[in-house]
Amino acid sequence: MTRDAKSSTPMSARLEDTRMVTGTGRFLSDFLGPDTLHAGFVRAEQASTRIAALDVIQAAAMPGVRAVFTAADLGRDGVAPIAHVDLPREDGGTTEPCPMPILCDTDIRHAGEPIALVIAETAAQLADAIEAAEVDLEPITPVSGTAFLRQFGTQGPARAAMAAAAHKHRIEVDIPRVTAFALEPRCVIARGVTDGGLHYRMSTQNPFALRAQLASHFGWDVSTIRVVADDVGGSFGMKGYMSREDAALAWAARKLQVEIAWIPTRSETILADAQGRGAAGSLQVGLDEDLKIVAIEGQFDIDIGAYPTHLAFGLMNNVNGLTGMYEVPEIFVEIAGQLSPRLPLVPFRGNGRPETTYAIERALDVAARKIGVDPIELRRRNLIGPDAMPVTTGLGFTIDCGDFPKVMQAALDLNPGAQERKRAAQARGMLYGVGLANCIESAGGPVRKPRPDFARLEVAGDGTVTLSPGVMSVGQGHETTLSEMVANRLQIDAARIIYRHGDTEALSNGRGSGGSAGLTVAGSAVCTALEELIAQGSRHAAASFGCSASEIAYRDGAFHREGTNENLPLAALASMTGGIDIESSFTPPAATFPNGAHICEVEIDPETGMTKITRYVAVEDVGRILNQVLVEGQLHGGIGQGLSLGLGEQIAFDEQHQILTGSLMDYRLARAEDLPMIETGSVEVPTALNPLGVKGVGEAGAVGATAALASAVSDALWRAGVEDFDLPATPLRIWEALQRR
């Protein structure tokens, strides 16, 4: 249920839904042809080893096998590893270069590394050939060390303020690694084109970035590469960059001049997909006698895996979340990226924002309970007020607008009756807990230097309008929102709009999907293109009528000469001019800051440690709301992911860094029965940073959910004598905590 007194947006269904629910979606496997060959990888079964011997002769001789490639073949073609990029070390240290080989030939830094690429006529022949490859491994010293280190804020003033604080409270956090587990795995159909080009169809969230990275790595002319994506079955950050598998498949398809498909099994994706989250550290909050925050100090280590890249910068890029929605005069934070014999770390929904929110909100909860003050009151005393906007935080980030007290109060107003539910739960012998988390994120960035997005509008003589946005829709509903925007501005039937996304031939560039930039940046680019189309059309119409463009007004799908009955329909104008073709871009002057307040209620069975989420409320300020249904959908999905992390979703490793959670029998994804009904509301504070007034919603739910669950679980356990509890809230961990109290 949604309560929103301000929004009057229509509750329209998604245009995409019809094809999705009728089985006519266009996912990658739907494009397999009768002559498509099947590709797969021989992978290392152990981390921290060296290849002592590799024999692929038998595999290459098996029926149906077209080719088996190793690192030696890549080397003969002059294909280099994916280059190591120096990362910042503000402690003066250095990091040993470690480029990532596309196919390994010596050291194996993590389990699952690709050793050989096998191409066969059928999937069954491929599986047999991979099994026939022989790899002998010998142990080596596991990779370790600091790959990057950044410091934020000012250490001296922060430590002085902390030393003088009346109350100081420190918490430890340990946020495990997770995997994206998209319904559609990373998969590719690559075809070498006779003129030396490449047609690369992929389940991706960023076709333009992939094209640019392939061209850069191999030295290919970018114009010879076409990347295409249709419907995508989920991404969450994992599908936004060139992987080593992408590089191997692109090279092989061009070399053999054939079409090859890589469609991994679920087991292979768990073994081979880069992972997200993976942060541990501590945060200390200092308060004065009036319970106002005077300082924050933090130190975090990020488990970045075996190969250091900027893709592991999520916590650093979103460090502003550590000050939350609060006045924090002094802060100092140190963040280090630590190498490990594990898969590389990449962005995952929220990308550092849920981690920072979890840290500050849990620290405030612990402080409030130990001081003996209501956690809500402690937050209320420290919230930044609307009169302070725009405000620059202690870390130097400027928040342009927002009404944080109103957002938190709106969430509280949506959650009456908590005391009655508490008494009822206790009467049944349950431990009841209620928790609140305030959350803020940056969107449409990066925050230091926002990137542009693009949009193209083509009007044909028959009146159809082709809309090609730079954003990639991977489930968010961009097709619906952007098509509605075009139909409303041009005042034409939405059925006349052709939506074309995910094709690098559709427009010059695009930023894909990520960072909650769909409407903030791509939508603004569409808005800019619409205004340019009308301005250009007005000039043509004025020339046709023999008047000034200032006398032309656009309405009802036509250009009208004011004061007369002369008009020129959009379709007729396009027919006269041979078609209208407009491409525009939009670069935000700064990032936006969506913010919200989430309330979670739980009941814990003290006999089993089982946690049941009984109620959930989320109020978000995502700026102006253009489609209420899609906003709710994004919040529900993000909240589900955030709660899943808190309930126990994690990649677990043994002492040799082998993955123990290799299937859904072991990897605990939240199920429908784990999630409550979710009640959402909104406080609309439009931003002036883009023409739509939107702030972004794609990651909002995930940013607040884990922290809200932690607050509720800690509240329940605190009442039972457990002073501090760090997620995940698995039955065993809660039961053990209750036994130790």
Image: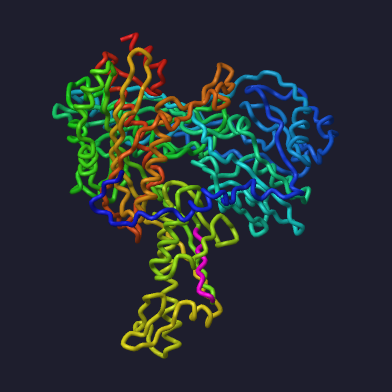
Lateral position of residue 309 relative to residue 195, left or right: left
Determine the residue positioned at 28% across, 34% down: 599
Magenta stretch? 462-469
Residue 191 position (above or below residue 51): below
The stretch drawn in magenta includes residue 465: yes
Q: Quadrant of residue 553?
A: bottom left
Lateral position of residue 525 relative to residue 188, left or right: left
Q: Position of residue 549 (x, y in %)?
A: 38, 83
Q: Position of residue 428 (x, y in %)?
A: 27, 18
Determine the residue positioned at 18% across, 27% down: 374
Q: Position of residue 365 (x, y in %)?
A: 26, 26
Determine the residue positioned at 51% across, 39% down: 311
Residue 327 position (above or below residue 538): above
The stretch drawn in magenta includes residue 559: no
Overall secondary structure of the magenta section: strand
**Is the N terminus in the top left, top right, bottom left or bottom right quadrant?**
top left
Q: Nearer the viewer, residue 46 or 213?
A: 46
Q: Position of residue 400 (x, y in %)?
A: 28, 51
